[in-house]
Amino acid sequence: RTSSLVAMNGRSGSLGTALHLLGAEFVIADLQPGYRYFVRVAAENGEMGSGIFVSTAPSSAVPRSAPPPPLGVTLSILDKNSLGVSWTDSRATDPHISSYLIEHFTK
């Protein structure tokens, strides 16, 4: 969980993410793809503190990016009717990879 504060005067503080204030908008950067992030906003002043938080619409989002390509992909002939394909399994270093897709075709 990350808590962040952004002041209207441009000063900001955050734990684990970068916030960039753009008027009445800001960008939350440096998030990890594939994790669901919930966001809410409250106004704050020096006299009364924070107001009521309002959830965004939608209340959460999952940043996504394409997984990296497989590494060390090799093709071998197994017999006159079969080919073998192998690669380095990257799921240990990228837990968001759920499976691999293998295509074959002729030209």
Image (cartoon, rainbow, N blue to C red):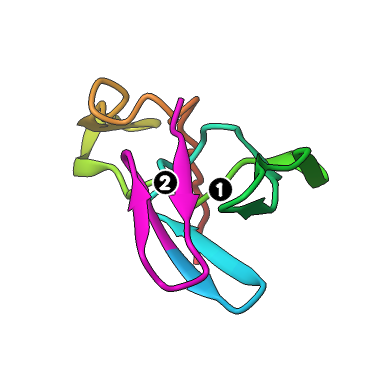
* Residue 66 visible in rendering: no
Q: Secondary structure at mark 2?
A: loop
Please state the horizontal and vertical placement of residue 54, each as a whole percent of the image. 80, 42
Q: Is residue 98 above or below residue 73?
A: above
Type of amino acid at the residue the image marks with label 1: Pro
Residue placed furthest toward the front? 47
Find the magenta span and give its range.
1-19
Please state the horizontal and vertical placement of residue 66, each as a whole percent of the image. 47, 52
* Residue 34 visible in rendering: yes
Q: Nearer the viewer, residue 92 or 2?
A: 2
85 displayed left or right of 41: left
81 displayed left or right of 21: left
Residue placed furthest toward the left? 72
Please state the horizontal and vertical placement of residue 98, each as a whole percent of the image. 49, 25
Disc 2: which residue: 31
> Residue 63 — which label?
1
Q: Quadrant of residue 67?
A: top left
